[in-house]
Amino acid sequence: MSFKCLGIFREKTNSPNRENDDTLILKGVTEELSGLGAETHLIEPENIDLINPEEWDIILPMCENRPNILKLAKWKNNCLVNPVNSVLNCYRDTMTDILQKESSRFYPKTEKRLVENLPGDGPPPFFTEKGCWIKRGDVHNTCTHDVHFIKDWNDCEKVKTDFESRDIKSIVAQDHIPGDLIKFYGIGPYKWFDWFYHAPQELSNFKFDLKDLEQAAGETAKSMGLEVYGGDAIITPESKIYIIDINSWPSFARVRDEAKIHIAQHIYSKKAVEVTGDKK
């Protein structure tokens, strides 16, 4: 089966210390697709305006800045992996709206606020002496201080100064969940899954069921509309699983050689269904 596939790299500002890894996973996937008979091409996001979308059957957008994503939203009759709405759903303020509306059992207590209103009338109701996380409300990390851990709510003043200096308008405050921190990757959902412990951290090795972790990640990905995704989870002493973040097209750095094959197969099968109409 022959088809044309366009890959769009992530903005360099959105790949802090991951520029090479982000590049390599997209190149790896398109190389695998070429081996399956696809004609592939890769572009930087600043060249989106030069593309005629009608010339491409499948588009793989790693880009995530809103102006670039909204350009793609105007393209018709194309299969995007991940779809435009799913990328925008991963903006933390939108993610919070979606998961709270669905009463996700895997999402920690989270509250949205405007940066200009920090520290406001006080902390969210879930704030305790264990502290909480303050995260920029739009895209995921562009630098190390897009996420702050605070134990004193008055420290929001420092966060406000930092975020306002970078024109960040909104935040999410999220409950701090003590436990083991895990990084996960998924495709499908439920076609392929992998995970590892974040380093460095002092591991407690709390027990958990891998199938439960995959289910939690998969349910969250489905809520976002994601097909190719990664994120972070916490395993508590009681073996409860929390998904604290999920995003579109991670770098898959530690599992790239395996992931690129599974992503390419997912895309190829998706195109095959489109051509044949066979969803089996």
Image: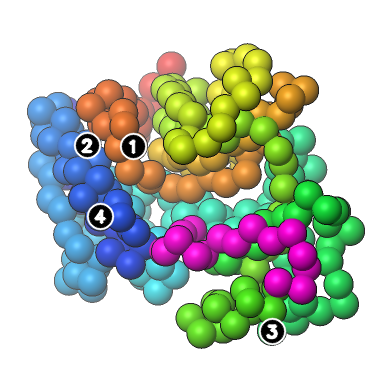
Mark sitting earlier along the chain (3/1): 3
Tell me the amino acid under the disc marked 1.
Answer: Phe
Q: Quadrant of the C terminus?
A: top left
Nearer mark to the viewer, of 1 and 2: 1
What is the spatial separation of the Cα atoms under label 1 and label 4, in whole angstroms?
12 Å
Mark sitting earlier along the chain (2/4): 4
Mark sitting earlier along the chain (1/4): 4
Q: What residue sits right under mark 4 in the picture?
A: 19
For mark 1, give the secondary structure.
loop
Q: What residue sits right under mark 2 in the picture?
A: 29
Nearer mark to the viewer, of 2 and 3: 3
Q: What residue sits right under mark 1 in the picture?
A: 252
For mark 4, give the secondary structure.
helix
Query: What x and y, as percent, mark residue 9?
Result: 25, 56
Q: What residue sits right under mark 3 in the picture?
A: 116
Magenta residue check for 279: no
Would you say the residues marked 3 and 1 are in contact, meaning their CB atoms lie under 8 Å apart?
A: no
- The structure residue drawn at horizontal position 34% and vertical position 59%, both measured from the top left corner, is 16
Q: Can see residue 79?
A: no
Would you say the residues marked 2 and 4 are in contact, meaning their CB atoms lie under 8 Å apart?
A: no
What is the spatial separation of the Cα atoms under label 2 and label 4, in whole angstroms?
16 Å
